[in-house]
Image (cartoon, rainbow, N blue to C red):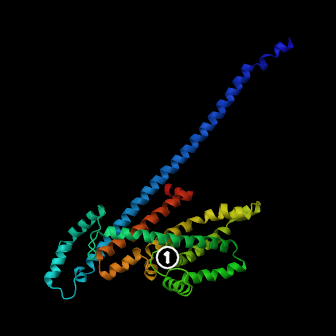
Amino acid sequence: MLWTCLGPATDPRHAQIDQLQSRVLFASAIFLTNIRHIQAATEKVNFLGQYLLQRVGYSLVALFGVVSIVFGILHLSGDPVLLLVPEGATQQDIDNLRHALGFDRPLYVQYLEYLRNLSRVDLGVSIIQQIPVLEIVLSRVSFTLYLALGGFFVAAGIGFPVGVILGVFRGSLGAKIAVPLVLVGQSMPTFWSGIMLIIIFSVNLGWLPSSGAREFSSIILPSITLGALSMATFARITRACILEEISKDYVTAANAKGISFTRVVFHHIIPNASLPIITVVALEVANLLTGAVIVETVFAWPGVGLLAIEAIEARDFLLVQAIVLFGSLIYIILNLVADFLYAYVDPRVKLVATS
């Protein structure tokens, strides 16, 4: 009888009901957690979208300003036709060339035509080569991209680790010796360092070609020359950011809790020091793409920088105008990328933007 009274407490049906209830509660908790994660991810995506659209609008305004300034400098600094006609040209020749280029029309008509052509990605035809300007620029862009990529690998591959080491081990003898060397590297002109590399590795040793882009090894010396200045900048800025973060209270608290120094550096100091570095990287990459005029001239590298020198010497102002717009567009795009990375990396950007 006692066994019969205790029977309902051990009824298998009650155990199955309890087990089913537990599974339902567990599934509900998981579902609610996933809903919260989805809501958080949706809010972040919406914020990034709004932030990006806002920055794109600012970038378009900046691009419009650059386009207007380039047009104004070209047309208001003097008669460009006088720079194009040969010596001894008659007034009839000047008038004919002015009419052929459309410079005899009112200035506002030329400006509107200029904007209309830009909206169709029509940069005009080279006066000297009689080829579309866009085609000429695009034929040289790949060489400039290769050179900028090589320079960035040199600058980032050496500059960032050196900056971290100099910041973390700031009191060591090696850091005290390396800091002046970094400053020396930043103060060397690119044309001088390029010539020195040519003399050492091309003329004296004969290891690497001195000019042109005929083979893969031709990019080594220009990349080192172009990346040396940015390498010193990366190292100096990274060191300053690491020193600023390493002196903050959260680093002291982490060390007091017994967290390993390596974990503190890689999981806390470097991520928090990354925001100023993002700005420097964006500006330096833009400099690598648009500031390679001297390097390309020294090494006869057939990029956009050397094309700019050739266009200026030939007085091909439409080509010069297109190169200036290309450089401005590079700066605007990279600043836009840096702003987007700010919003993605740093949650404080969201707090400031929504406050």
Is 126 displayed left or right of 163 in the figure? left
Up the image or down, 272 lies above or below 101; here it is above
Q: Splitting the image into 4 quarters, where does residue 35 fall?
A: top right
- Amino acid type, mark 1: Ser
Q: Residue at x 45, y 83 (%)?
A: 298
Q: Nearer the viewer, residue 116 or 26?
A: 116
Q: Nearer the viewer, residue 330 or 310?
A: 310
For label 1, the SS is helix
Residue 340 is situated, as x and y percent measured from the top left of the image, at: 49, 59
Most extreme residue toward the left, as rendered?
A: 92
Q: Residue at x 77, y 61 (%)?
A: 258
> Within 10 Å of the Cα at label 1, are there few (<14), some (14-19), or many (20+) other Cα atoms?
some
Q: Residue at x 62, y 73 (%)?
A: 163
Most extreme residue toward the top, as rendered?
A: 1
Residue 288 is situated, as x and y percent measured from the top left of the image, at: 48, 73
Residue 354 is situated, as x and y percent measured from the top left of the image, at: 50, 54
Q: How many marks?
A: 1
Quadrant holding the N terminus = top right
Q: Splitting the image into 4 quarters, where does residue 105 fall?
A: bottom left
Q: Nearer the viewer, residue 57 or 143?
A: 143
Q: Residue at x 28, y 73 (%)?
A: 126
Q: Nearer the viewer, residue 165 or 48?
A: 165
Circle 1 sits on which residue?
A: 218
Residue 63 is situated, as x and y percent measured from the top left of the image, at: 36, 66
